[in-house]
Image (cartoon, rainbow, N blue to C red):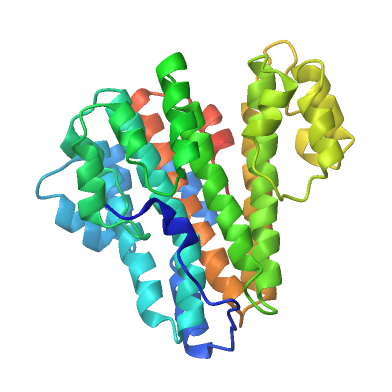
Amino acid sequence: MEQRTLLQEEKPRSIRLGQAPYTYARVAVMRSKLVKRDDYSRLMKMKVSEITKFLQETEYKKEIDEMAVNYSGVELVELALNRNLVRNFQKLKRIAEYEGLRLVMQEYMKRRDIWNLKTILRGKFSGQDENSIKDMLIPVGLLSEPSMDALLKKESVDEIINEMPYLSKEAVKEASEYFREHKSLFAAENLLDRAYYTNALDFSRRIKRQGIVFREFIEEEVDVVNVKAILRLKKQGMKKQDIISSLIPSGTLSHSDIEKLSGAEDLDSAVSMLDRMGYAKILKDAYDKSKKDISEIERRLNKSLLDKTILLLHTHPLSVDVILGYMFAKDIEIKNIRTIIKAKQLGIDDEFVQKELVIGG
């Protein structure tokens, strides 16, 4: 098992990023293969079998063909999506022209380690078998497959938490105690997120010049994660100090704004405060007070973040930002396709699914 301190492994004090026209040109080609906006409308009208056939005519063909030997339907598509993401992200590492670029890619890809750890926790918590959980893992970060296999073989969620990479001993203790008391993964998942984003921001400060945009990207994402967390926890009636202690530090929201939102009387008050903090466009007609439904706000927050990263693809065509923009857009593409096929499987209304999709442009 890797040491818990994977997020704090020794790095150069500063990282310099020069020009890499070959890498950026290759990424531009990869970007051109992303699913187009109009294609999502077509996918919405298809059955799962038709979606599978459509994907076979795209860059997902290799994975669909390989997995079709043993899988079919929704399971086939989901596994093919995961395999394709791994292949594309591994390709990015190969075409990086120098170590600085690879380090930036690696820093972003660590979020997949966090995703994998959450998947293992959730799978074990819900009683899924080891192979089913393993099929959903996406090994592109620092965690090796043997280390994830070792976690999968643990008998209980508590055992997994106690061997959790990326968390300090203090964080492991906190997550374990919370799980035993509440039978909830909230603390473990929240602490993993905090560890990732705190480290990513620290990493961005080591990058000369181009690190500014990377840092802004992470800070914007932290804001979205924090706002969604505040709304969810406020909806649950959690107390102010408990909410604040659950948030990720170092976003662009001021400490004063965080204090006000976390201390809001109720969910309605928190939403009203956000409206006055620059989120008016996102909040317009997005919140139904009678239902206390925040799903539309969350979707719009996600979309606003995607829109900002799409700008990176167009305004910085010869910088590391185009790579970050591509990786984020690829992640969103996978999420969108998975949302569509799951909806088909469960018979969910297309109008509802359309609102769940995050499409740039």
Q: Looking at the picture, does residue 358 appear above or below residue 311? A: above
Q: Is residue 46 visible in the rendered structure shown here?
A: no
> Which one is in front, 239 or 304?
239
Give the left or right position of residue 318, taking residue 101 as reference. Answer: right
The residue drawn where x is 62% and y is 53% is 306
69 and 6: which is toward the camera: 6
Which residue is outermost to the top?
A: 290
Instruction: Count the numbered circles shown.
Output: 0
Horizontal side, residue 221 vs residue 34: left or right: right
Q: Looking at the image, which residue is at 90% across and 35% down?
A: 276
Which residue is at the front of the view, 178 or 71?
178
Instruction: Report whether 288 appears left or right of 109.
Output: right
The correct choice, above or below, for 142 with respect to 175 in the image is below
Residue 257 place in picture, x, y as percent: 84, 37
Q: x, y percentage for residue 4?
A: 39, 51
Q: Quadrant of the C terminus?
A: bottom right
Residue that appears at 50% across and 27% down: 186
Is 106 rendered above or below residue 291? Answer: below
In this view, the residue in front, 206 or 176, is 176
Q: Is residue 111 visible?
A: yes
In which quarter of the view is residue 84 placed?
bottom left
Side of 358 relative to 338 (left or right): right
Q: Is residue 350 above or below residue 197?
A: above
Could you say which quadrant of the image residue 75 lies in? Answer: top left
Q: State the residue lying farthest toward the front.
A: 169
Q: Position of residue 359 (x, y in %)?
A: 58, 49
The location of residue 299, given as percent across then percent down, is: 62, 37
Q: Residue furthest left?
A: 69
Query: Looking at the image, which residue is at 85% across and 26% down?
Result: 272
